[in-house]
Image (cartoon, rainbow, N blue to C red):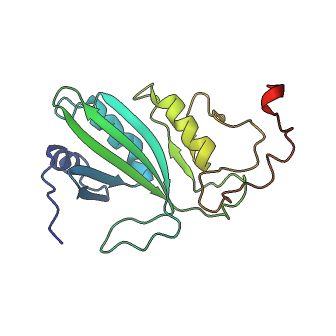
Amino acid sequence: MAKPNLDHPTLALVKARFPKAKLFATEFRGDTTLVVEKQNLHEIMSYLRQDYETNYDFLSHVTGVDYMGYPKSEGNAPEGRFAVVYILVSTKTNTNLIVKVMLDPSLPTDGIEEDPALHVDTVTDIWPGAEWMEREVFDMYGIRFDGHPDLRRILLWEDYPAHPLRKDYPVEGRGERENFRVIGREDA
């Protein structure tokens, strides 16, 4: 396996600015990912947005990943079942960076119960456009964003009994659709 090319210009800047933070970087197919701990996430994201040298002025996407069933990583890579992934772009330097924070649930994930371990700070105060993307991650994965101005479901109804993109959610559902009347073509 070839050694990754970790000469992304932002990595050295972040390491110098946060010398005590536990950071992990990886590169895959030309995309550099910086994995940070959740207690450092907001401070690092704020630095990436506001510093003149980094200037990641565009938050392209926020998404979630459920790593349930994935093989354990090699080396000292941070592990967790869930990840919140932020894709940042600097329009000034035309540079992309993926920032990831790993989360490990402390409660069973097969229901809707709020898990205190599945909380991260919101970045809506840094990039206002994160509001709807964070709501989607909350709706689909149950990850809560502390400080979010309007954290509620965005795709499913408020009483929906689960978070359907978690891998322990059954593909066929849990009976949520059985109460709906089937509408035929002639009735539509």
Picture quadrant where residue 137 is located:
top right
- Quarter occupied by residue 182: top right
Q: Is 117 positioned to the left or the right of 176 in the image?
A: left
Residue 133 seen from this side: yes
Looking at the picture, how far across and down is residue 55, in whole percent?
23, 30
- Residue situated furthest front in the rendering: 186
Closest to the observer: 36 or 183?
183
Q: Is residue 132 left or right of residue 61?
A: right
Q: In this view, does 152 lie to the left or right of 19?
A: right
* In the foreground, 150 or 188: 188
Let me know if residue 146 appears in the view.
Answer: no
- At horizontal 24% and vertical 49% (from top left) the residue drawn is 31
Residue visible at 59% across and 51% down?
165
- Residue 122 place in picture, x, y as percent: 49, 37
- Where residue 6 appears, as percent x and y from the top left, is 16, 56
From the top left corner, tell me how far across and down residue 112 is, in percent: 72, 52
Above or below, 36 against 149 in this view is below
